[in-house]
Image: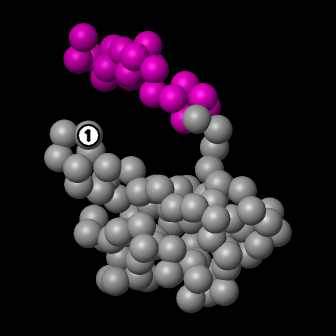
Amino acid sequence: MDLFVVGFPLDLDEEKLTRLFEIYGFSVKSVKIIKDSSTGFSKGYGFVTIEDGEEAQRAISKINGQFFESSRITVKKAKPKSSQVESYTPTRWREKIECEGEL
C-alpha cells in the first residue's frame, strides 16, 4: 500500500524517511520524496510503500501526527494519482476565482 507522507522537514532525505518507518518496526519497500523540478529541493511530501496492507494501516495509526525533527508529520493512505489531479483542474481554480470575484 502506498502512503502519503507530508509535513516533514525539507532537508529530510529518503534514507532518513525510510529509517523513521523502520524505527517503528515497519518494512518499507520504497520511498519517494517529491522534489521541485527547478531547484531539486524537497517539497515536504512524499510516498512510502509498505507491501502488507495491515502493516501499512498500523504505520498510519502509529506515525500519523508524531513529531519528527520538530515537525509534525501526517501519514495517510495515498489516493490514486487521477483523483489527486482531478481536484486541481484549471476549471476548478477558475470557479474558485470567479466565486471570490477576482475574474
Asked whether residue 97 is in view, the answer is: yes
Q: Residue at x 38, y 21 (%)?
A: 93
Q: How has the structure been colored for display?
A: one colour
Mark 1: few, some, or many residues within 10 Å (few <14, many ≥20)?
Answer: few
State which region is magenta.
82-103
- Residue 87 in the image, given as x and y percentages of width and height: 52, 29
From the viewer's perspective, tell me whether residue 44 is left or right of residue 39: right
In the rendered structure, does residue 92 fall within the stretch colored magenta? Answer: yes
Q: Is residue 69 left or right of residue 75?
A: left
Instruction: Tell me which residue sits at (60%, 29%) in the image.
Output: 82
Q: Which percent across, then down, holds residue 103?
A: 24, 11
Secondary structure, mark 1, is loop
State the predominant SS element of the stretch in magenta.
helix
Instruction: Please tell me whether residue 37 is drawn above or below residue 25 in the rendered image.
Output: above
Whether residue 99 is visible, yes or no, is no
Q: Which residue is mark 1?
A: 37
Q: Quadrant of the N terminus?
A: bottom right
38 relative to 66, above or below = above
Residue 44 picture location, percent across and down = 34, 59
At horizontal 34% and vertical 83% (from top left) the residue drawn is 69
**Residue, x 51% and y 66% (percent of image)?**
74
> Residue 99: x, y in percent?
37, 19
Q: Nearer the viewer, residue 95 or 42?
A: 42
* Magenta region includes residue 36: no
Q: From the viewer's perspective, tell me whether residue 89 is left or right of residue 84.
A: left
Above/below status of 5 relative to 25: above
Instruction: Please tell me in which quadrant of the rendered image residue 94 appears.
Output: top left
Q: Amino acid at mark 1?
A: Ser
Residue 5 located left or right of residue 40: right
